[in-house]
Amino acid sequence: MARRMREEAFRVEQEQGRYAPHVRPINEMVDVLRDQDGRGWMPHVAPWHGGTEARVLSVLRDPGPRTQEGTGSGFLCVENNDPTAELQAQLFERAGIAPRDVTPWNAYPWYINREPKTAELQAGAEVLSRLLGLMPKVQIVLLQGGDAQRGWRRLVKAHPEAVRDRTLEVFSSYHPSPQALFVPDPKERARRAQHRIDTCQKIGDALRRGTKQP
């Protein structure tokens, strides 16, 4: 089921669990980072997800409009009421990846609703390093889209200690937004769509085995 944030009961449940034990450290970090250096607002991670207990860290570009409070849910969540979240929920469900397996995040975690600049990706890498420190069980990183992949490279370069002693498998694929398929060649569109499906399937298989891909 997708877009459950449209349901008042589900939305209230997420709001009531905002500081549940498994997401408290992350959402308290978000509280500190909001408006830091004038950067603006940042959504919390919905308790629907695994938070500090998750084995998968899913990184997109930046928070979308439906993560905002008032006009949206106030959370990063695959159940948000927008096409990107809906497709993400469908891809995960199809691959057997449960919501609690995943913590969603962004290469630039503050709300801008545009492509982040180089300095913004660097700032995002700093936060991503802190986030990894709060996720001791993470085994897999899913980088969706070019900005997520560039942000991860900045993290590895600037903070090698964040990943040095960890066994992480990093998967890269296309962003789950409709724009990722805005190419004229239908074969290329189909290839990108299938690549997203295949990547999630590999992650689901790895989670079920409980080990890294060979």
Image: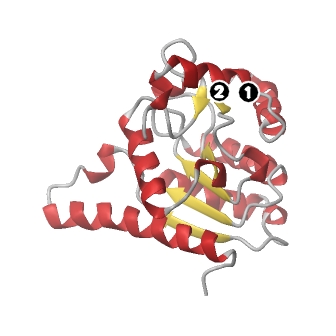
Q: Amino acid at mark 1?
A: Arg
**In the picture provided, is 5 more to the left or to the right than 177?**
right
Q: CA distance from mark 2 to mark 1?
A: 6 Å
Residue at 42% from the left image edge and 38% from the top image edge: 2
Looking at the image, is 73 positioned above or below residue 62?
above
Residue at the farthest front position:
9
Residue at 71% from the left image edge and 70% from the top image edge: 168
Quarter of the image with the N terminus is top left
Q: Quadrant of residue 20?
A: top right
Q: Secondary structure at mark 1?
A: loop
Viewer-proximal residue, 61 or 195?
A: 195
The residue indicated by pointer 2 is: 14
Quarter of the image with the C terminus is bottom right
**In the picture provided, is 61 more to the left or to the right than 213?**
left
Q: Are marks 2 and 1 in contact (CB under 8 Å)?
A: yes
Q: Amino acid at mark 2?
A: Gln
**In the picture provided, is 213 more to the left or to the right than 134?**
left
Q: Quadrant of residue 3?
A: top left
Residue 49 makes an appearance in the image: yes
Instruction: State the image coordinates of residue 129 (x, y, percent, origin top left).
Output: 77, 52
Viewer-proximal residue, 188 or 137?
A: 137
Residue at 21% from the left image edge and 54% from the top image edge: 183
Instruction: State the image coordinates of residue 65 (x, y, percent, origin top left).
Output: 46, 25
The residue indicated by pointer 1 is: 18
Residue at 53% from the left image edge and 28% from the top image edge: 112
Instruction: State the image coordinates of residue 12 (x, y, percent, origin top left).
Output: 62, 19
